[in-house]
Image (cartoon, grey):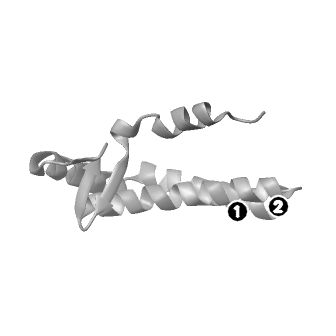
Amino acid sequence: MELTSKTQETLLNLNTKKVFSEVKGEIYIGGEKIKPDIRSLLKEQAGYLDTSQLWEVLCATIEQESAEMALKTSTEWNHVLSAKMLHHWNFVFKNMINKLKQ
């Protein structure tokens, strides 16, 4: 099934109000700069999450799953690409938490 350009545009714009970005040390969500009080709250939450056992389990599980998929269970290139996507997902989330902790 091939996506139409309108469908692709809709998917790209989905939840843009919640999209995280960091520019020159400033945090933006949905294109809006985060106010100091919200930034402080997010920093505290990111610090807690980063030191939690749940976060450790989630990250280790994704890393293991991506390695298993790419190295052991893949039978075609698309499986390897999916594994790379899982690995990248973990990378993005870890970076986001690290930027929020600062």
Q: Nearer the viewer, residue 53 or 70?
A: 70
Secondary structure of the residue carrying tag 1 is helix
Would you say the residues marked 2 and 1 are in contact, meaning their CB atoms lie under 8 Å apart?
yes
Is 102 above or below relative to 40?
below
Q: Nearer the viewer, residue 80 or 66?
A: 80
Which residue matches tag 1? Answer: 67
As shown in the figure, which amino acid type bears the numbered disc 1?
A: Ala
Which residue matches tag 2? Answer: 72
Q: Nearer the viewer, residue 93 or 19?
A: 19
Q: Nearer the viewer, residue 1 or 86?
A: 1
Secondary structure of the residue carrying tag 2 is helix
Residue 64: where, in percent of width, then height? 65, 59
User: Would you say residue 51 is visible in this rendering?
Assistant: no
Going 82% across and 61% down the picture, which residue do you hit?
Answer: 72
| Left or right: where 86 falls relative to 49 | right
Going 45% across and 55% down the picture, which residue do you hit?
Answer: 93
Quarter of the picture containing the C terminus is bottom left
Residue 67: where, in percent of width, then height? 70, 62
As shown in the figure, which amino acid type bears the numbered disc 2?
A: Lys
Residue 58: where, in percent of width, then height? 51, 50
Going 10% across and 47% down the picture, which residue do you hit?
Answer: 37
Q: Quadrant of residue 7?
A: top right
